[in-house]
Image (cartoon, rainbow, N blue to C red):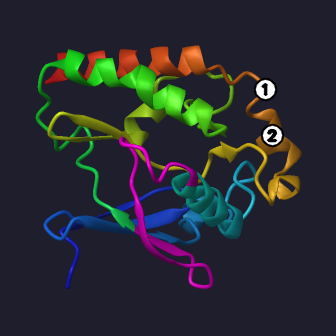
């Protein structure tokens, strides 16, 4: 079966099957025109896969995040539940429906000891990164993309580069909440 569409990120190719209710995220090297197979911040495809799977495993009992259906550590892919469309393909309902979910989402991440990157480059203050992590389905807002997240206290934490760890020095959950809320407001104004 062919996916309805695919998307390409820094370290992955995602196949989307909305009618079947799942996506498959394959961790693959980025295109040569963007430089090396993976950037220094992320470290390796194996670590990206590990962080994504670790975070989703921690979040398995909570709404607003994909659920793991299957995975292959050797082939570096994760099959997970479909949680909606991105802002470009989704007709948003009243923005307050989504803004009111932000505190719960970020508080859940905090309770599971997950720091999720919310800026393109650490400390740049740009809101654009939030656009790529938000999915909308009905009245539910979900967050995706945990390859650049830090599952604090995980088994492989010692393998994270100093550059990666330092990128979270300025991490602030209140600023993250604010960035998500501002991004949702901005999206709503564009619709």
- With 93 as the anchor, is 188 left or right in this view? right
- With 96 as the anchor, is 47 left or right in this view? right
Numbered disc total: 2
In the figure, residue 91 lies in which quadrant? top left
Label 1 to label 2, Cα distance in Å? 7 Å
Across and down, in percent, residue 123 comes to: 68, 22
Judge whether 82 appears above or below 183 on screen: below
Is mark 1 in CB contact (under 8 Å) with mark 2?
A: yes
Is 17 or 131 nearer to us in this picture?
Answer: 17
Check residue 169 in the rendering and tell me which mark sits there, or answer none.
Answer: 1
Tell me if mark 1 has few (under 14), some (14-19) or many (20+) residues whose alpha carbon lies within 10 angstroms of its own: few
Q: Quadrant of the C terminus?
A: top left
Judge whether 96 appears above or below 161 on screen: above
Q: Quadrant of the N terminus?
A: bottom left
Across and down, in percent, residue 148 comes to: 62, 47
In the figure, residue 37 lies in which quadrant? bottom right
Tell me if mark 2 has few (under 14), some (14-19) or many (20+) residues whose alpha carbon lies within 10 angstroms of its own: few
Across and down, in percent, residue 178 comes to: 47, 14
Q: Residue at x 55, y 35 (%)?
A: 109
Q: Residue at x 21, y 81 (%)?
A: 2
Q: Is residue 37 visible?
A: no
Is 32 or 66 nearer to us in this picture?
Answer: 66
SS for tag 1? loop
Is 88 or 171 nearer to us in this picture?
Answer: 171
Magenta span of residues: 58-79
Across and down, in percent, residue 114 comes to: 63, 40
SS for tag 2? helix
Taking the view exactly as shown, the residue that stands out farthest to the front is: 61
Q: Is residue 19 visible?
A: yes
Judge whether 132 appears above or below 174 on screen: below
| Magenta stretch encompasses residue 71 | yes
Check residue 165 in the rendering and tell me which mark sits there, or answer none.
Answer: 2
């Amino acid at each position: 079966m062919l996916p309805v569409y695919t998307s390409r990120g820094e370290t992955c190719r995602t196949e989307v099957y909305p009618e079947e209710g799942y996506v498959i995220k394959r961790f693959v090297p980025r295109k040569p025109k963007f430089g090396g197979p993976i950037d220094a911040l992320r470290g390796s495809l194996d670590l990206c896969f590990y962080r994504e799977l670790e975070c989703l495993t921690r979040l398995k009992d909570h709404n607003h995040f994909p659920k793991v259906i299957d995975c292959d550590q050797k082939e570096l892919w994760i099959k997970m539940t479909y949680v909606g469309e991105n802002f470009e393909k989704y007709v948003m309902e009243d923005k307050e429906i989504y803004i009111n979910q932000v505190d719960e989402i970020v508080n859940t991440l905090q309770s599971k000891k997950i720091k999720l990157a919310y800026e393109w480059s650490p400390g740049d203050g740009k809101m654009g990164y939030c656009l790529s992590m938000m999915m909308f389905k009905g009245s539910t807002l979900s967050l995706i993309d945990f390859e650049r997240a830090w599952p604090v206290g995980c088994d492989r934490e010692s393998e994270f580069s100093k550059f990666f760890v330092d990128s979270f020095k300025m991490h602030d959950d209140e600023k993250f909440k604010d960035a998500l809320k501002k991004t949702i407001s901005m999206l709503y104004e564009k619709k």
